[in-house]
């Protein structure tokens, strides 16, 4: 049985701190829509490079996205993997 492909994404920007866009965008992967793309684009444009690069914080934050995506509880979406 084939399952529909649901494209989702999230961004983690980091230097000495790891940051994501606030609200639901910061806690889980979100569907690719014009609204989410514009919100995340504006978030990225508002950031400036500075400080160091704490990869450990960025990876922990990114792994949190995947943890929330795998539990099937967010946004009423069930993953079928």
Image (cartoon, rainbow, N blue to C red):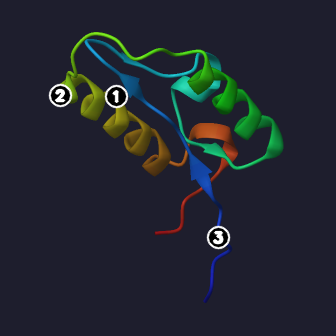
Q: Which residue in the structure is indicated by mark 1?
A: 61
Disc 2 packing (10 Å; few <14; some 14–19; many ≥20)? few
Foreground of the two, 16 or 20: 16
Cα gap from disc 2 to disc 3, whole angstroms: 30 Å
Instruction: Give the residue displayed 65% in from the left and 51% down from the top.
Output: 77
Q: Which residue is drawn at 68% across and 48% down?
A: 31
For disc 3, the marked residue is 5
Instruction: Say which residue label 2 marks.
Output: 56
Secondary element at image label 2 = helix
Residue at left 26%, top 30%? 60
Cα gap from disc 1 to disc 3, whole angstroms: 24 Å
In the displayed structure, would residue 58 be above or below residue 6? Answer: above
Residue 16: x %, y % from top left? 25, 12
Q: Which of marks 1 and 3 is nearer the N terminus?
A: 3
Do tag 2 and tag 3 residues touch (Cβ < 8 Å)? no
Mark 2 or 3: in front is 2
**In which quadrant of the rendered view does residue 63 lie?**
top left
């Amino acid at each position: 049985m084939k399952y529909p492909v649901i494209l989702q994404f999230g961004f983690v920007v980091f230097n000495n701190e790891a940051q994501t866009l606030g609200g639901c965008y910061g806690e889980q992967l979100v569907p690719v829509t014009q609204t989410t793309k514009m919100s995340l684009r504006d978030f990225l444009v508002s950031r400036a490079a500075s400080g160091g690069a704490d990869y450990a914080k960025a990876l922990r934050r990114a792994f949190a996205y995947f943890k929330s995506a795998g539990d099937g509880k967010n946004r009423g979406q069930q993953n079928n993997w």
